[in-house]
Structures are given as C-alpha cells and as structure tokens.
Amino acid sequence: MQVDGSIALVTGGGSGLGAATARHLAAQGAKVAVLDFNIEAAQAVAHECGGIAVQADVSDEAAVSAAFDEAEQKLQSAPRIIVSCAGVGMAARIVGREGKLSFDVFEKTLKVNLFGTYNVMSHGARRIAELAPQKDGERGVIINTASVAWQDGQLGQAAYAASKGAIASMCLPAAREFAQTGIRVMAIAPGLFQTPMMEGLPEEIAAKITANIPFPARLGEAHEFALLAEQIVVNPFLNGTTIRLDGAVRLPPR
C-alpha cells in the first residue's frame, strides 16, 4: 500500500512515538488524523503536518467510535492506515511495601494499553472493510504498539508487560480474521526510546538502562519507530507478526 494519498489515523499522536509517526506519514503524503486524549497536543502536531486533531480516551469504546466518525467526516473517507501508539507506562509491584496491592494500576494499564488498542483496531477494521480494495485486494493495515517488555518484563512491570504481551499475542489471530477482507495487522515492540515516558525516569536509572543496549548504544529515536511503521505499510507481505525494534537489547530483571 502506498502512503502517499492515503488517510491515516494515529492514536497517541500528540507526543512521542505517535507524534513522530503522524509527522512522518504526513511527510510521505498521507492525510493524518492525530488522535490524543490531550487535544491541545493533538492540535499542535496536526498543525505541523497539515492534518486534523481528534480527541478521545481510547479506553472508552463510545469515544473511539465518535472519533472515527469525526475523522471520517473531516477527511471524507475512513483511514486505510491505523497506528495505535496511545498508552501508559505505570509501574508497581504486585505486592508492594506493607502488603499494598496494585490492582488499580493493573486495571488502568490494561484499560488504556490493551482495551484501548482493541477498541481502535475493532472500529478501524470495521471501517476499512467497507472501503474499495486496492492492488492485490488490500484494503488497509493496522499497526499496534507492543513493547519488548512483553518478553523481557522487569520487576514492577507486571501490568505493563501483561498489556503489551496481550497486544503481541492478538496480532496473529487478528491478522487471520481480517485477511478475508484484505486488512493486514502488525505489531511493533519498541525497546528503549527517547520519549516523554523515558524522560520521566531519574537520570541514573535512564543511564543504567541505556548501558544495556548493544548497538546502537543509545536510546531509540522516535523517527526510527515511524520509519518502521512506514515500511510495514508499504510492504504487503508483512502480516501477523510482532517486530522488536530495540538495538538488540534484552532487559535485565530490574
């Protein structure tokens, strides 16, 4: 599928990996709907890339449906390219100090990361299926964001790893289901990237984490995630798998 001339919707598009992806796809000729919970951030990115901004909490199924309706109305077509980058990175031990439990963290993390991704994929696939097929019967592509934590989850990442592992696990069955309508489904599992989520870590912890990356020995750059998203879009034989984008890092236990 060609990026140029296509309509794309990017969730979490107001910052980090989502913002980089929105900008990159727009630079390649796509019309982009930038969806974010923070509408001001979405508007700023949309202004940069000549797209539109849409506000939604991805964990709210009705809000996601309304956001797709709004994007389709403003761009005069449903998107063929959907990239889900919205997510949270809360950390907590399952049983913390003095026996404190963390179900609240687990619940919120899965609602945003997993349920949010599922909501966007569901509404996106239904709308893409109604579009006319392009070359080789392809109608569109959905790219979800997992994390290397789905395989290398560290101490305190039970909730995050569970949410991202589920995203990776549903990639193949989703791809098999949507194959009959010409929709591909892929997932990217980024490693350690220079994003607002990483910038919130104490400097000494960030330095320790970066030291574990073999090559390039640095944090990933958001445009590298965006570049892989573009490559997935244009390569029609990429389907049903999760690609680690991580500089060969394997996270230590803590």
Image: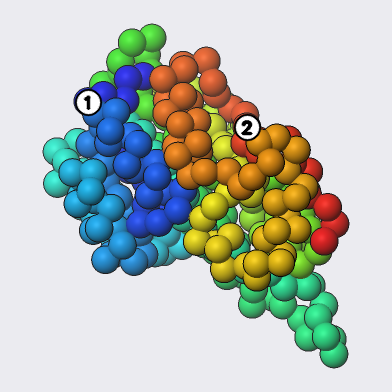
Where residue 27 appears, as percent x and y from the top left, is 28, 33
Q: What quarter of the picture does the N terminus occupy?
A: top left
Residue 243 is marked as: 2
Q: Are marks 1 and 2 in contact (CB under 8 Å)?
A: no
Q: State the residue at coordinates (67%, 60%).
A: 206
Q: State the residue at coordinates (35%, 23%).
A: 139
Q: Secondary structure at mark 1?
A: loop
Where residue 38 appears, as percent x and y from the top left, is 34, 66
Where residue 177 appears, as percent x and y from the top left, is 53, 29
| Front-lying residue, 200 or 75 | 200
Colour scheme used in the picture?
A: rainbow
| Front-lying residue, 138 or 220 | 220
Q: Amino acid at mark 1?
A: Gly
| Residue 212 at least partly seen | yes
Mark 1 sits on what residue?
A: 5
Q: Secondary structure at mark 2?
A: strand
Q: Amino acid at mark 2?
A: Ile
**Disc 2: CA contacts within 10 A as few (<14), some (14-19) or many (>=20):** some
In the displayed structure, does residue 192 sit left or right of residue 119? right
Q: State the residue at coordinates (58%, 49%).
A: 193
| Front-lying residue, 149 or 17 | 17
Mark sitting earlier along the chain (1/2): 1
Q: Is residue 158 above or below residue 72?
A: below
Q: What quarter of the picture does the C terminus occupy?
A: bottom right
Where residue 89 appears, as percent x and y from the top left, is 60, 63
Q: Is residue 104 above or below residue 6?
A: below
